[in-house]
Amino acid sequence: MIRTFAIAGSLALGIAASGPAQAQDEILNVSYDIARELYAAINPAFLDQYEGGDALTISQSHAGSSKQARAILQGLQADLVTFNQVLDVEILAENGFVAEDWQDQFPNNASPYYSLPAFMVREGNPQEIDGWDDLARDGVSVIFPNPKTSGNGRYTYLAAWAWALEEFDGDEDRVREYMNAVLDNVEVFDTGGRGATTTFVERGIGDVLVTFEAEALNISGQTEGYETVVPAQSLLAEFPVAVVERVAEQRGTGEVARDYLNFLYSTEGQEILASFNNRVHDEAVVEANADRFPETDLFTVEDVFGSWTEAQETHFGSGGVLDQLLRN
Amino acid sequence: MRRPLLIALAMLFAFAVIVLPVAAIFTRAFAEGAGVWLSAITAPETRAAIWLTILTALIVLPINIVFGLCAAWAIARFRFPGRRALLILIEIPFAISPIVAGLCFLLVYGAYGPVGAALQPYGLQLMFNLTGIVLVSLFVTCPFVVREVLPVLAVTGEDEERAALTLGASGWQIFSYVTFPNITWPLLYGAILATARAIGEFGAVSVVSGAIRGQTMTLPLQIELLYNDYNTTGAFAAATVLALLALVTLILRGLIAAFHPARGATS
């Protein structure tokens, strides 16, 4: 019994020590799944130019961004979030963790960089896939993650829908017909973006992988035998950031957190972001990287679907449009 | 005619299901040479994950032994209201999926759970740190010691203990000279199984870990993460460490079976 108490005691001390006392010299950036290398490059660059950067540690946590939002709601001590889903920050805002006007606190809807669903095809593009209409063609095998479980998949689904809605002048029956054809062509529905990439690259399944342009460029840059095709129209995928006010206030890290996020908008920050194949807003950086990012028209979720919340309810909820389409 | 067929079938199965995959871990891990392997497992984050995993196992182990002994003793020797319920309760972690266990702990000990919320004003946080990882590890491992010790206690019965009592032994003397020698091996065996489980646990830990790199990533979580980062060599190198830890427990298990024939016969 004595041993148990001793252990319980040391545990309790451990918790106390990890409480608010030592917080100032450390901030925690809670981020999405595949941003590890990106922030591993951002963090030292930020610390280098930051006054007092020597005494500061930036910790990283990466997982699916909905899972991360949930963990923060349950007490994960995040000072700031860098997500790939607007909805996941909204949930934090609804629960009072993030300011209600979080999208106005940083430029460009608090999205320092963006990307868009694009196509990765096998070398030489044997199936001649150039646009969204090609995904519905007979005999084309399509890979993208399940929109039910993956933000990446949701973007692909909504991009295809937005394109079709314009193509068919808002005739929803024809849009559904098109979406049915695309979904019929899906060979494997992985649960996440990385899983879909693995299916396409390592297992060699499918003629086209639809994923974020950044992911497609990363892979085709590293591995031989693939090409990235950017369709003429796609959907804006924002990567929202926010300070988790409730935690930062308590730990006295609000200012550092804000400086950190502002660094993402600086020329140096934007250069690093662009070097990881994200599209950015800084004009000089945009110009320097123009050859890598072909021009494309971007729909926004707000314009086409009203809001993320509405898109979520209409399309991805139980019994929503996606469920109806998959049933056919 | 049938016997060689059966043996061949069993061997083939063991080869396909156990030998091949384990061999693949090691060949992949060492594909780029031992130097690359070494630098992969000594990378700061992987090292931190190895240490966290071992630390968790070291904390969980003594608690498991004490709790397991108390529970097994109580159930075997006393008749009390709720005894059957306790017996069933202890089995629950085997039946519940680890991920559900993790979620249950979040619901109770998370910031909005009854316990978590009560502790928050004092700056005490139970989830997303070592405490959370230890708590869920305790949950998934607590049946092992009881399950091994209880049957032995039941079989040996109370006769020897009663005899000791009539000879004037104190409670502690009875335990240390009569009871404990009978259950040493099952106790160790249960402790080893529990430790192996604690080291390998993924689902429950993943829910309460918070996934902070270098801080709350246990080895299994780190392996998945490295794999998803396309760091195949790093992932498989870390996997060899996990496999080696498992191998150590396996060898200990084998030794126990060898030194204690009864144990070897039943397992």
Image (tube, coloured by chain):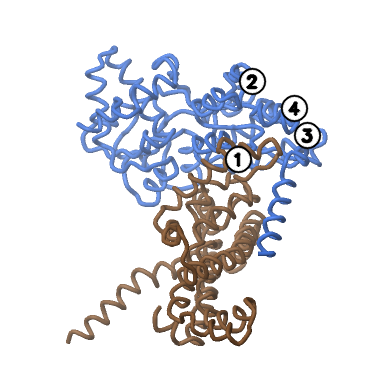
Chain colours: A blue, B brown
How far apart marks 3 and 4 lie (CA) works out to 15 Å
Horizontal and vertical percent for residue A5? 68, 59
- Residue visible at 49% across and 84% down in the picture: B159
Q: Check the image and report above or below for B75 versus A212.
A: below
Secondary structure found at label 3: helix
Foreground: disc 3 or disc 4? 4
| Amino acid type, mark 1 | Gly
Q: Are marks 4 and 2 on the same chain?
A: yes
Name the residue carrying label 1. B116
Contact, mark 4 vs mark 2 (Cβ under 8 Å): no
**What is the three-letter code of the residue carrying label 2?**
Phe
The nearer-to-camera label among 3 and 2 is: 2
CA gap, disc 3 to disc 2? 20 Å
Q: Chain of mark 3?
A: A
Closer to the camera: disc 1 or disc 4? 1
Q: Nearer the viewer, residue A144 or B107?
A: B107
Give the Cα distance between marks 1 and 3. Answer: 39 Å
Image point (59%, 69%), residue name? B34
Q: Does label 3 lie on the same chain as label 1? A: no
Q: Is any part of residue A51 visible from this angle?
A: yes
In terms of secondary structure, where does tag 1 sit? helix
Distance (Cα) linking label 4 and label 2:
14 Å
The amino acid type, in three-letter code, at marker 3 is: Gln
- At x 70% / y 39%, what residue is drawn? B123
Q: Is residue B186 left or right of residue B168?
A: left
User: Residue beneath label 4, please?
Assistant: A255
- Residue at disc 4, secondary structure: helix
Marker disc for residue A49:
3
Dot 4 falls on which chain?
Answer: A
On the image, numbered disc 2 is attached to which residue? A106
- Label located before the other in sequence (3 or 2): 3
Chain for numbered disc 2: A
